[in-house]
Image: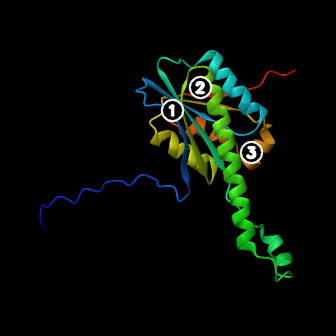
C-alpha cells in the first residue's frame, strides 16, 4: 500500500443546458453592489421594480441585473395523440415559431424594464434565460455574483405553493445572499 495522496477533485459548477442571452448592457460601470431583479409581465413584478427603485437602488453604486426566464416550448403528452392524426402538421415549425415568439416577448419585456431603470439613472444589464425558473435564476444569480435579489410574489396560497412550488420560496431558501420578496399592497 502506497502513501500517495488521492487526486484532488474539483467540483464542476452546474452548467445550465439552456439559453442565457444578454439583451441589454449599460455603459461600462464598476458597481459596488449588484442587485438581481427577476421580472415577468405580471403586476407583481412591475411593483417589485418600482418598490426597488423607491426603497433600495442607488444610482451611484448599484448595477441592476434584470433576469427573465421563459419556459421550454413543448407539446403535452395528451396532445401528441391528436397531432398524430394531422400528418400535414409540422411540429418543428410550430415549436420554432412559439420559441421565437417567447424569445421576442422576453427580450421586449427586459428592454422595457431596463429603459425604466435607466430613466432613474440606474446602471442596468438585462439577461433572458430559458428553462426552469428556479434553477436558471439561482445559477445566474450566482454567476453574476449578485449581492441582493429582489422579486415579486405571485401571492400563491399555502396549498397551491405546496403543489406547484414557488420560485420566490425556492430562491429564499437556496441563495446564499439576501432575497427580498415584495408583495403588492391589497387594495
* Residue at horizontal 68 percent and vertical 50 percent from the top: 104
- Label 2: few (<14), some or many (≥20) within 10 Å? some
Question: How far is the residue under mark 2 from the one under mark 1?
Answer: 8 Å
151 versus 82 height, above or below: above
Mark 3 Cα shell of 10 Å, populated few (<14), some (14-19), many (≥20): few
Pointers 1 and 3 in contact (CB under 8 A)? no
Q: Earlier in the sequence, mark 2 or mark 3?
A: 2
For the residues bearing labels 2 and 1, Cβ distance under 8 angstroms? yes
Which disc is residue 162 wearing? 3
Mark 2 or mark 3, whichever is nearer to me: 2
Residue 105 x %, y %: 71, 47
Instruction: In this rendered view, identify the residue nearer to me: 136 or 41.
Output: 41
Out of 27 and 51, give the one closest to the viewer: 27
> Relative to the observer, which residue lies in front, 181 or 59?
59
Disc 1 or 3, which lies upstream in sequence? Answer: 1
Q: Residue at x 83, y 76 (%)?
A: 83
Q: Name the residue that disc number 1 marks.
A: 26
The residue carrying mark 2 is 118
Amino acid at each position: 500500500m502506497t502513501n500517495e495522496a488521492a487526486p484532488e477533485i474539483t467540483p464542476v459548477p452546474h452548467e445550465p443546458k439552456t439559453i442565457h442571452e444578454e439583451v441589454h448592457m449599460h455603459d461600462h460601470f464598476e458597481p459596488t453592489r449588484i442587485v438581481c431583479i427577476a421580472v415577468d409581465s405580471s403586476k407583481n413584478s412591475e411593483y417589485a421594480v418600482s418598490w426597488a427603485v423607491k426603497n433600495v437602488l442607488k444610482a451611484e453604486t448599484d448595477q441592476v441585473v434584470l433576469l427573465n426566464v421563459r419556459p421550454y416550448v413543448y407539446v403535452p403528452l395528451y396532445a401528441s395523440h391528436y397531432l398524430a392524426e394531422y400528418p400535414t402538421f409540422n411540429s418543428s415549425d410550430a415549436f420554432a415559431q412559439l420559441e421565437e415568439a417567447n424569445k421576442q416577448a422576453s427580450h421586449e419585456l427586459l428592454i422595457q424594464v431596463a429603459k425604466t431603470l435607466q430613466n432613474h439613472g440606474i446602471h442596468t444589464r438585462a439577461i433572458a434565460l430559458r428553462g426552469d425558473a428556479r434553477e436558471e435564476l439561482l445559477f445566474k444569480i450566482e454567476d453574476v455574483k449578485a449581492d441582493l435579489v429582489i422579486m415579486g410574489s405571485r401571492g400563491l396560497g399555502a396549498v397551491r405553493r405546496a403543489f406547484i412550488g414557488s420560485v420566490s420560496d425556492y430562491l429564499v431558501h437556496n441563495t446564499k445572499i439576501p432575497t427580498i420578496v415584495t408583495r403588492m399592497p391589497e387594495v
